[in-house]
Structure formats: C-alpha cells, structure tokens
Amino acid sequence: MIPYKTIIQFDRNSKQALYLQLANQFIILIKDKKLLPSTKLPGSRTLASLLEVHRKTVVACYDELLAQGWVESISKKGTFVHADLPELYQKEKQVLDDEFKSNSAGFQFYTDKKLERKSPKLQEGFMSLNDGVSDVRLTPIIDLARIYRRISGRKLIYKEMSYGSLFGNEKLRKTLSEYLNKTRGLNTTISNILITRGSQMGIHLSAKLLLQKEDVIIVGETNYTSADTSFLQQEAKLLRVPVDENGLVISKIETICKEQQIKAVYVTSHHHHPTTVTLSAERRIHLLNLSKTYNFAIIEDDYDYDFNYQYSPILPLASHDTNGNVIYIGSVCKTVAPVFRVGYLIASKEFVNEAANQRRFIDRQGDALLELTFEEFIKNGDLDRHIKKVMKIYKQRRDLFCKLLIDNFSDVFQFEIPKGGMAVWVKLNKKYSWKKVTEIAKINKLNIGDWQRYDNAKIGHNSIRIGFAAYDEKEIYELMNRLFKTMKEIRNDNF
C-alpha cells in the first residue's frame, strides 16, 4: 500500500481548499504511475484517519476526481483509478524537473526573426540609458484612481462590462474628437476615431490594411524600428529616404513617385524618431500634395506632440488633410504612463470601419472602464494640467542634461538641443564606437542598451537616441558621472 500519510502533505495556510490540494496530489500520483489504472483507493474513513482530516474532505476530493474522469466509482466495491486512462508518455522525472520548465516546445511552430528584440536584464546597481520615455513617478495615479473608483461605483456600470463597440467607448471617442479638434486643428467626428491599445496597434492595423507582399512604403533612413518591423511583417518593400534638419527629404519621395507606385509614407512629423527633428511646414504641404497626386497614404505617427518646450507645436499633417490621405496615430501612453494602453487611430470613416473589423481578431475591444476614466480625465482638464506640470519638469531636465553633455563631452558627442520630446540624438566622434563605449560602460555599471537599433553601419551616422525625461536631477548627475568615467577610459585608450 502506498504510504499516503508521508507522501501527501497539506498547506493549511494556503487559500486553496484542502480537498483540492488532496485531489491535485492524487492526480500527480496517477500521472507519475505510482497509482496505476484499476488501483483501488482507500475508503474515505480510512484515508481521513490516515491524513487527519475530516471525512467530508476525502469525499469531496473523490467527487472532484470522479468529475474530472481520473477515477471511477463501482457500487459496493469502492473507488478505483479509472481503468481506461491512456498512458501519459513523458520525459523521465529528473529530466522533467531540470529542463521542461524553460526549454523547448514539443511541437513545431513558426518564428519570425524580424520580431527578435534584445531585452537584457538590468543588474542591481546599474543605470540604463533609455530612448526617451516618460517618468512614471510623475503619473497622476491618485487622480486616475479616484476617477476609476467613482466610475466603478455607478449603479448602471454593469452595462459597460459586457461586449462593447469594436471602435472603443463612445464617450471617449466623442470627448477625444472634441479635444483633438481643439488642440491639433483636426476636423473629426467620432466616426473617424478608433480607440487602440497604444500607437503600436494603430501602426499594426494600418500596415495590415495598406500593405501586401512587395508593396512599397517609404520611411526615413533612420526610423522607428517597431514601425519598420510592422511593415516588414506584411512582406512590404521599404524604401528609405534621407532625413536632415528639416525632417524627411520630400523631394526624394517625389522622385520615387515618378518612377514607381508607392502605397504609403510613414512619418513622425512632430519629432522624427529617432533624430527628434521636426518636419518643416513647407515639406508638410509638399508631402500632402504628393499624396493627393499619387494616391498614397500618409501614416502620421504623432507620438509626442504634447512635449514642446520653446513654442507651440506645428499642427499635424492631419489638420490640413482634406482628401482623406492621412492616417493619424497617437496615444496617451507617452503623456501619462506606458501602462495605460489608450491610443487612437484617426482616418476616413471607411478606413476606420475596416480597421475596427481587423482589430476584433487581435483584441475584441478595449478596457471600457479605463477608457471611461480617461474620458473624464480629458474632459475635466486633468490631462492638460498634467501636461503643463511635466512639461516644466522635463524642460528643466533637458536643459541640465544637455548642459552636462556640452560641458563634459563636447569633444566626443555632437547633438542639437531638442526643441521638444524626451530624448537627444547624440552623434559619437568617429574615432570611437558605441560597441567600445558599451563594453567600458558596463565596468562603470552603465547599460548603453541596444545601440545597434540606431547605429546603422550602412548609413554610418554613429548616433544613438538618449532619453532624459525619466531621470530626476540627482539621477542625471549620477548618469553623467558614469558616462564621464567611461569616456575618460576610452579617451586614454586612444592615446
């Protein structure tokens, strides 16, 4: 007889009921072939006495095993391991314990090398350069939580908790339409807006609808890598045009249009990603005219429109579009915090309708309660107040960050002080390499990150994007101290 008293253990501090703990341990014994098919289990009174539990616990356990099909009850004979259970083929127990938890799948599946992304785990005591993210510590979490609680407590809130519109919450779409019309000069109604789970979903949906194999899309020589990946997943052909101090060189796009058909142009017009330059007004008009003449779409990713430190931002391309050529994509993720996956795709009604049809197969709908929370957050003016607050803080951080770069690294780094956004596009003196900087930085507990995302050897710009917004003043000084030690060692190596 199996020594049940020593094999079976209960955790009486666990929230899981004792009968379920007992049932799960019986299942393991059956799977491990310690209890073979047709083996008789102890009577409920006998097992209860052995395990020092109430008989009702054992009865409930046997009922659970019976319901799941692991055992069968034979009248006047007792409870038995089911006679017809197939044998479970698996690795040896030792191999299972050591390897199965994190190793290979037991079946074939498709992989996509284009989606691979390095995500090194940051070691304790290290600081890491980012490519321009907000400081989540500034998130107005108390205000948002208060609104969320108030909404959740409404008598009729249950109506929002079932399946809703594929387009997103109607109240948010209406409020967002009014807000964007007012702040960005758009001319939209709710029929032009699809709520998304951040900008990336908008880019994905646009790529899905616009591009098929060998279709041509124009992007910058330097470009937002996640957008590139979305286009490549559609097997599209990416044509790259130069980016200078005035943004994408539109004259190059015109030359391409005269030679071949293109389906779309992707542009981060306000602060080009990654270089942070702004597309000039003249080039915006030129691009809009080309889109009308050659019937291509403009995917305008306005990921950080709100962050501008010296003057009012130039209105987006979408505000001047009267021909339905622009797909305008944005989110509140950058503005408030990345965890709040609320974004939007704005386009012609027919495009938005089809985007909603596509969206339902990857994400049936958004989070209605969160969307209602942001509807009130925007409508009450809380979003504008938050933007004004963080703008002042980020400007101070930008000024300090750039001053320290100039004071300490003028011989190795070249950059323009960004007029907005949350990052600086830093060019390294060609005597040095980011590969070497990365190696030495680790000694000083500084992680440079995936510099190869930006340092395109083919172009040879030797530049990367470095964010400043997520660090407070003390952290900026410490980061610069570690960078200074790194560059000092590299300078010495070059003499």
Image (cartoon, rainbow, N blue to C red):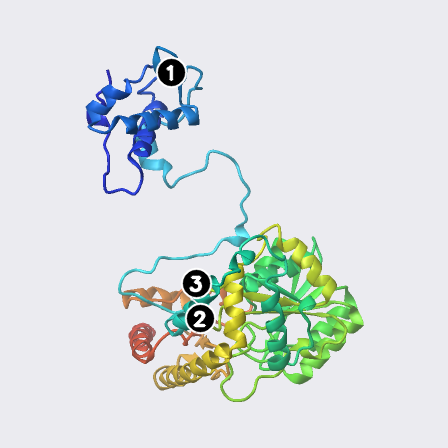
Mark 1, secondary structure of its residue: loop
Pointer 2 or 3: first along the chain: 2
Instruction: Name the residue carrying label 2.
Output: 133
Pointer 2 or 1: first along the chain: 1
Pointer 3 or 1: first along the chain: 1
Of badges 3 and 1, nearer the viewer stands: 1
Instruction: Name the residue carrying label 1.
Output: 37
Tell which residue pokes out farthest to the bottom in this image: 311
- How would you rate the neighbour count of disc 3 (Cα within 10 Å): few for under 14, some for 14-19, many for 20 or more? some
Tell me the quarter of the image containing the C terminus: bottom left
Instruction: Please name the residue shown 55% across and 72% down the image.
Output: 303
Work out whether 173 lies above or below 160: below
Q: Which three-letter amino acid code belongs to the residue tagged 2?
A: Val
Q: Which three-letter amino acid code belongs to the residue tagged 1?
A: Pro
For residue 55, side relative to residue 242 (left or right):
left
Of badges 2 and 1, nearer the viewer stands: 1
Work out whether 3 lies above or below 273: above
Instruction: Name the residue carrying label 3.
Output: 450
- Between 274 and 364, the one lying in front of the other is 364
